[in-house]
Amino acid sequence: MLTEFGKIFVFILLAAVFVVVAIFASKLIRPARPTKEKLLTYECGENPEGSPWIKFNIRFYVVALIFLIFDVEVVLLFPWALAYKDYGLSGFLVGAIFLLVLGLGMAYEWRKGDLEWARPVINPPVIKKQPYVKEVASQISADDNQTVLQDQEI
Amino acid sequence: MEFHSILNSLTYLAPEITVSAALILVVLFDLILGKNKKALPVIALAGMVAASFFVFQQMTFNGFAFSKVSQPWINVGMITVDSFGAFFKSIVILATVLVIFFSFSSEEIKKSFDRLGEYYTLVLGMVLGMFLMISASDLLLVYLSLELVSLSSYVLAGFTKLRERSSEAALKYIIYGAVSSGLMLFGISILFGMTGSTNLYVINSLLQAPNINHLALAFAGILIFAGIGYKISAAPFHFWTPDVYEGAPITITAFLSVASKAAGFALLIRFVKITFISGVAPSGHWQMIPAFPWKEFLIVISILTMTLGNFSALWQTNLKRLLAYSSIAHAGYILMGIAVLSNQGLIAVLIYFGIYAFMNLGAFFIVMLIANKIGSEELEDYKGLGYTMPFLGVTFGMFLVSLIGLPPSAGFIGKLYLFIALVDAKMIVVAVIALLNTVVSLYYYIKVLREMFLAKPASPSTAFKLSPLSLILIIVMLAPVVIFGVYFNPIVEFAKGCVTILGL
């Protein structure tokens, strides 16, 4: 007979087999007529521009981290807020110490400038006065893309 | 759990509370004082001194904090306070105090002056995690404290932002750490699934039942060992060690190699002994639950660890990497002491650890002083160092001799007690393998000495003035290494008094 872990093992096995079978079956059945357009990387219907390996701005992570900390804090404070009356002064002090320590962390972040929203430095593209030729136009648009990328990197 | 039992437990947590208070004060003073960072190490040191006072009180304590009153049939708690824990906590305190003093004279730390507040905060955070790790007797707290130590050490390993190797070390450390802590969590979940409890004592009493699934238990044991083995850099989980030790600032390398290892070993011993024991024979040997062969498993791991550590060290040309592999080898020797699974082996482990702390910290400190001076940790830059810096050369030689384990140094006493425990347990083959390993280790330690004393100095002698603080620190670390080599009764008696693990 199967144990409980045995059932899980069968489940994992079936899942793996399903993936392999599905991929190979669809490969056998589907028509394959690749064109250049079809093989392009999909990017919201646009033609892909530049490398996808761009740096994300660090500020997103900072905001996410701070949000996480204070989100967890609220989760911990809810049960305390419901029950602290039953335990008198010491119950209140426990929560107060917790809040003070968290507040200190917040003050530290503030003081060290981690709450400042790092602003991108905008370099407006310089448009040279030249007769409008198709190549120049594409050159300028490439420059524009370059500036956008730089902004994101900051 | 009643509220008042929680409040009553706080008396058992005095060292942990002291460390937390010191941590908060460091953050607060860093905010108030701004550019003036002189007060921060003083606060950290004061916190450690106060914590050591409470730890010495705990030498005679025996009790559980956060015990479950709702289950009167078995009065056990999340945190166990006993003399065994107090021993390892005092090693952690010793390492922390010395490392804080190291940081005064470290050029690497001085360069990142504006982040000094974070440095001391993270060190104290690590100490707090280690204290909890040492006394944890609940799987949840085991995992939580392990993560607290790991997260602080990831940041500290990459503390010197300017060097690329430092960031690489931190990244490698975090990736290995994530994998092994994931494995450990899986093992914990299996153990919890088998017994329905996270408390080690409750798990132990439930595992005594005859109808335990051996395969699942073995699986859980190995997976949890993966998490702990990563902390102590035991063999299949040691790959991070050389890279991290090389990339991290030397103060942190020294700290990781002693304090974090001490906490890992304390956790391993407590976990193995509490969870898998079924009784202690009159001879002091532990009778283990037959479901999982801990003895054979630990012997294999320890032989693998010391052989890999020693043989890889043979080819190292960087002093930090060399000491990293040597610390892996030492972890192998200590694991061998645990594999005896008896109180005698445990005493040997404690003695070895007490001595290892001094000699390893000392060796790293001198490597740091030399790196401050010549700006390199490569072996070829050590040519003729015994003549250009005679004092450092000679003291470094003494630490290395102790690390080899030659008499009359303290390292010899540590190895002697380990081998006696092995021979008494009739594990002659293991003892012989360890002995051969020691011979192998002789080669690479002596290689350093040869470079320092038998090679001609590459550059003409430069005047090197040792600051009084460094001189005192070297003497403080050298004295035990020399004294315990000839008069080792105090440390042996101290270790014998500290083998009691509560409840067993």
Image: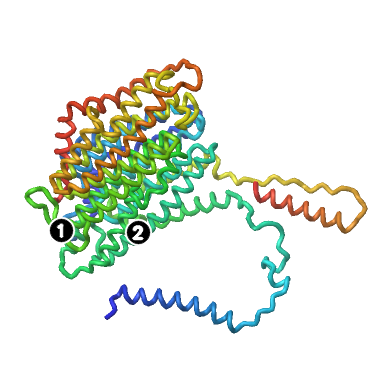
What residue do we see at 19% from left, 59% from top?
Answer: B204
Question: What residue did someone put label 2 on?
Answer: B185
Q: Position of residue B202 (x, y in %)?
A: 19, 60
Nearer to the camera, B247 or B310: B310
Using the image, name the chain to which the residue with label 2 belongs. B
Would you identify the image quadrant in which residue B185 lies? bottom left
Q: Nearer the viewer, mark 2 or mark 1?
A: 2
The count of marks equals 2
Marks 2 and 1, how far apart at CA: 25 Å
B284 sits to left or right of B195 = left
Secondary structure beneath dot 2 equals: helix
Nearer to the camera, B25 or B163: B163
Secondary structure beneath dot 1 equals: loop
B29 sits to left or right of A150 = left
Nearer to the camera, B437 or B116: B437
What residue do we see at 34% from left, 26% from top?
Answer: B397
What residue do we see at 54% from left, 79% from top?
Answer: A24
Question: What residue did someone put label 1 on?
Answer: B74
Amino acid marked by disc 2: Leu
